[in-house]
């Protein structure tokens, strides 16, 4: 077992930060108890002022506003939804200076959303974890642990999922298994992004941003009526930024170069029928993630560095001199250089994605509604990575990845005449076809791996809510899912340095297929004590499909596979929404039993890792969130999350060998996370407005792989952001200025180490400034 690393910056500042963020939410909660003692203030801040601030769309009002969510497929106030969900409106995100979906993780407790390229060289692979459950690889043979949805459509692949926010209506983060109402495989939770719908009123804007490292971004949007009953919304975004990890051969790493388009049409065919058509397209063409080599593995037994030096270049680099030699023909840590990558092989990241979504809403009568969601998405990506970070050929990766998906969902909503019983029944169908072609150049051999994969999923679900009284309601849901996966690999040895003939099959030819049929229930009981307080409890189940192992060598006689994993979750929560002032507090505690976990294992002598169902775990914790607007122009929000994730058993049978034990920590899961921000509106006599905001985000350290490799740990840290926005009296002009990561923390955000010994990390860019100018048309 590897020794847990000591984090150099785990100093008094971080201890103070942890106490600060944990206490802030508690203090907000305790302020409820003091409300009666501050009667004069309550009288000044009447319910009318509270409502006005919650509905304001700029400054403090945008952050405090009331949000309508559809976490239960019905539109309802966030504070009336008896489940753990965090939601932000598009206006609220803009007021907080958030422009990329990954930044939502910093202000949402127990959510870790990061760009995690891992083995591949893609610049836009998302790694999302909620309450300890997620996914670390982009392969088509492995499914996500957290569902990602755009306008109600499940997005199967994480490549291209670190999207900039363009005309977003709201984002909802649902915690815990979503096994009843949402698409598939949501064992950890779901992230749902909803676009702004077209409206009749004309409005448009032009928004330009400049900033650090030649940041340049332009957004243009137009909305309004086309003809009677037909409205349109069209937006485009272009963004570029220079890389920050130097590469002597050119093309600095960590750059951005993206173009995105979104168009929507809304047709009000009648008073009872509404049709929405949405089209989106995005493309990225970049140099690749900002990987830096931190360890060549020259001292690691069995690593590629030793093989390269001793076998392929034995005349000059054989052990032991090859470990420390400065001869450029020897592979060792002479190529480690912070802020630079000395690789010379091709390194790039290209992604093209588009989708179409047709939504039809039909009010059959006053108590019955039908919704249809038909969607198609297409993804094409190509990326390459010189993983050894040197001019030598030790480890090079190339991927050509494509995926197309079709989904159809029908939802029928009903309400009884007395409105005591509300229900939804649905049918869901999903079909994905994809291909992943890898060319792997290793010191020992070169491989060509061409893999076709498919997934077909069909589900039937129903959920109903019965109100026994005005205060007490029970919700019961059930979903039956039938899934089929296929994997058709064509993997051959192109050439080798270990005596294996070219053309040798690595995995046997032929179609591999596996099926899964699962039933997942949910039960929720909610009690509204009064107009301010609600408490609830939930039991839910979820599962994630099995899959296949894709990257393995030497050849095998059978294709390695793994089965589904399962989660049973228990949750107890509360929600408070003050009648007298803009003040909310939401909290939830949870316990999850996580069984048959898909854990990486290995077989001695093999390159690559085997995914296997060998783990069981227990995960417990809580979230607490609070927002308060006071004195008409001040706003404070705080959140804290705690996750205690423990493996309870690791059961491995030969020839597999466990790469972890029950002492290992979950990867990508900080034990504590928190955020705290303070904002103030400054109103001027001419009617203009300035909103200033300071925010801090805190997290404890976490590991970036299940093996808990010390060299790729994201440390305990606190990040501070500063923003200020000026809005003209007529709301025509707006100027935003901001500094992100104000203390210039250059920490490890992600890392990769396979069993070939080489270690790479991606570090945060550091302090960034930006200035944004907007002109609105009305």
Image (spheres, grey):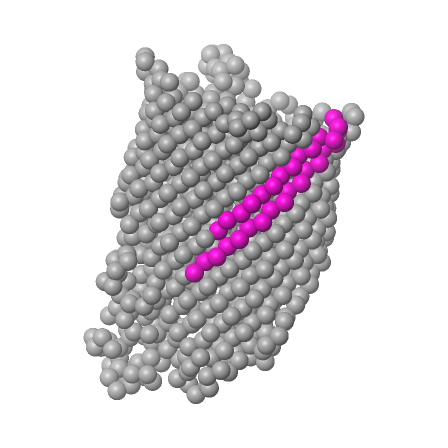
- Location of residue 495 with respect to 107 vertically, above or below: below
Residue 355 colored magenta?
yes
Q: Is residue 534 left or right of residue 35?
A: right
Between 178 and 205, which is closer to the camera in this rendering?
Answer: 205
Between 470 and 179, which is closer to the camera in this rendering?
Answer: 179
- In x, y percent, where is residue 366? 74, 26
Magenta stretch: helix, strand or loop mostly: strand
Q: Quadrant of the N terminus?
A: bottom left
Q: Residue at x 78, y 29 (%)?
A: 416
- In x, y percent, where is residue 723? 33, 32
Magenta stretch in the rendered image:
353-382
Residue 81 shows up from this direction = no
Q: Residue at x 36, y 60 (%)?
A: 348
- How many numbered discs? 0
Residue 351 shows up from this direction = yes
What is the residue that sits farthest to the right in this orientation?
A: 417
Q: Is residue 531 left or right of residue 384?
A: right
- Location of residue 547 with respect to 679 vertically, above or below: below
Q: Residue at x 58, y 43 (%)?
A: 357
- Location of residue 538 with respect to 56 vertically, above or below: below
Q: Quadrant of the C terminus?
A: top left
Q: Is residue 758 left or right of residue 92?
A: left
Quarter of the view holding residue 96: top left
- In x, y percent, where is residue 360? 65, 37
- Location of residue 741 with respect to 563 vertically, above or below: above
Q: Residue at x 38, y 37 (%)?
A: 219
């Amino acid at each position: 077992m590897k020794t847990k690393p000591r984090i150099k910056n785990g100093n008094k500042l971080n201890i103070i930060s942890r106490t600060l963020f944990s206490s802030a939410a508690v203090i907000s909660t305790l302020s409820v108890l003091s409300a009666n003692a501050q009667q004069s203030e309550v009288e000044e801040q009447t319910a009318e002022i509270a409502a006005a601030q919650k509905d304001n769309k700029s400054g403090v009002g945008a952050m405090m506003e009331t949000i309508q969510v559809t976490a239960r497929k019905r539109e309802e106030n966030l504070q009336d939804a008896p489940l753990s969900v965090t939601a932000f409106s598009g206006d609220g995100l803009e007021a907080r200076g958030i422009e990329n979906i990954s930044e939502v993780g910093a202000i949402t407790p127990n959510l870790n959303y990061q760009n995690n390229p891992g083995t591949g060289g893609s610049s836009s692979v998302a790694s999302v974890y909620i309450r300890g459950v997620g996914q670390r690889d982009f392969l088509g043979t492995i499914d996500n642990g957290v569902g990602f949805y755009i306008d109600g459509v499940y997005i199967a692949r994480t490549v291209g999922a670190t999207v900039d926010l363009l005309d977003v209506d709201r984002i909802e983060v649902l915690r815990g298994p979503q096994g009843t109402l949402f698409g598939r495989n949501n064992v950890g939770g779901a992230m749902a992004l909803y676009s702004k719908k077209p409206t009749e009123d004309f409005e448009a804007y032009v928004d330009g941003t400049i900033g650090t490292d030649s940041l340049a971004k332009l957004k243009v949007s137009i909305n309004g009526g086309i003809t009677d009953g037909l409205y349109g919304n069209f937006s485009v975004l272009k963004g570029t930024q220079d890389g920050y990890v130097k590469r002597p051969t050119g093309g600095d790493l960590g750059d951005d170069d993206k173009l995105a388009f979104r168009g929507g049409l809304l047709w009000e065919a009648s008073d009872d029928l509404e049709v929405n058509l949405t089209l989106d397209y995005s493309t990225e063409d970049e140099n690749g993630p900002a990987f830096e080599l931190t360890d060549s593995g020259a001292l690691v037994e069995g690593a590629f560095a030793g093989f390269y030096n001793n076998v392929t270049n034995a005349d000059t680099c054989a052990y032991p001199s090859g470990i420390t030699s400065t001869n450029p023909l020897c592979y060792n840590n002479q190529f480690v250089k912070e802020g630079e990558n000395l690789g010379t092989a091709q390194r790039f990241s290209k992604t093209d994605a588009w989708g179409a979504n047709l939504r039809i809403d039909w009010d059959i009568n006053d108590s019955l509604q039908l919704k249809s969601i038909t969607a198609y998405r297409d993804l094409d990506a190509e990326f390459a990575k010189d993983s050894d970070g040197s001019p030598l050929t030790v480890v090079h990766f190339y991927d050509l990845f494509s995926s197309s998906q079709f989904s159809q969902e029908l939802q029928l909503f009903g309400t009884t005449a007395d409105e005591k019983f509300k229900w939804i029944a649905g049918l869901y169908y999903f079909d994905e076809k994809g291909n992943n072609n890898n060319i792997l150049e290793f010191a020992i051999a070169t491989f060509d791996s061409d893999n076709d994969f498919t997934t077909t999923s069909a589900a039937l679900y129903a959920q109903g809510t019965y109100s026994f009284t005005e205060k007490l309601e029970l919700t019961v849901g059930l979903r039956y899912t039938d899934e089929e996966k296929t994997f058709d690999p064509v993997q051959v040895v192109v050439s080798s340095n270990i005596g294996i003939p070219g053309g040798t099959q690595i995995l046997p030819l032929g179609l591999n297929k596996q099926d899964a049929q699962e039933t997942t229930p949910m039960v929720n009981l909610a009690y509204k004590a009064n107009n301010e307080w609600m408490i609830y409890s939930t039991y839910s189940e979820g599962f994630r499909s099995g899959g296949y192992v894709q990257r393995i060598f030497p050849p095998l006689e059978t294709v390695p596979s793994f089965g589904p994993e399962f989660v049973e979750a228990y949750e107890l929560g509360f929600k408070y929404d003050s009648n007298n002032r803009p003040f909310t507090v939401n909290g939830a505690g949870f316990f999850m039993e996580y069984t048959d976990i898909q854990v990486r294992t290995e077989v001695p002598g093999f390159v690559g890792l085997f995914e296997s169902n060998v783990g069981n775990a227990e995960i417990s914790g809580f979230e607490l969130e609070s927002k308060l607007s006071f004195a008409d122009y001040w706003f404070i929000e705080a959140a804290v999350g705690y996750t205690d994730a423990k493996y309870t058993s690791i059961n491995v049978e030969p020839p597999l060998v466990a790469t972890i034990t029950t002492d290992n920590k979950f990867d990508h899961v900080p034990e504590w996370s928190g955020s705290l921000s303070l904002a103030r509106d400054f109103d001027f006599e001419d009617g203009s407005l300035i909103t200033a905001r300071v925010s801090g985000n805190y997290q404890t350290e976490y590991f970036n792989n299940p093996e808990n490799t010390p060299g790729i740990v994201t440390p305990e840290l606190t990040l501070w952001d500063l923003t200020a926005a000026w809005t003209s009296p007529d709301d025509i002009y707006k100027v935003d200025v901001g500094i992100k990561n104000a203390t210039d923390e250059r920490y490890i955000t992600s890392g990769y180490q396979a069993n070939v010994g080489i270690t790479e990390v991606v570090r945060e860019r550091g302090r960034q400034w930006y200035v944004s100018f907007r002109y609105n048309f009305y």
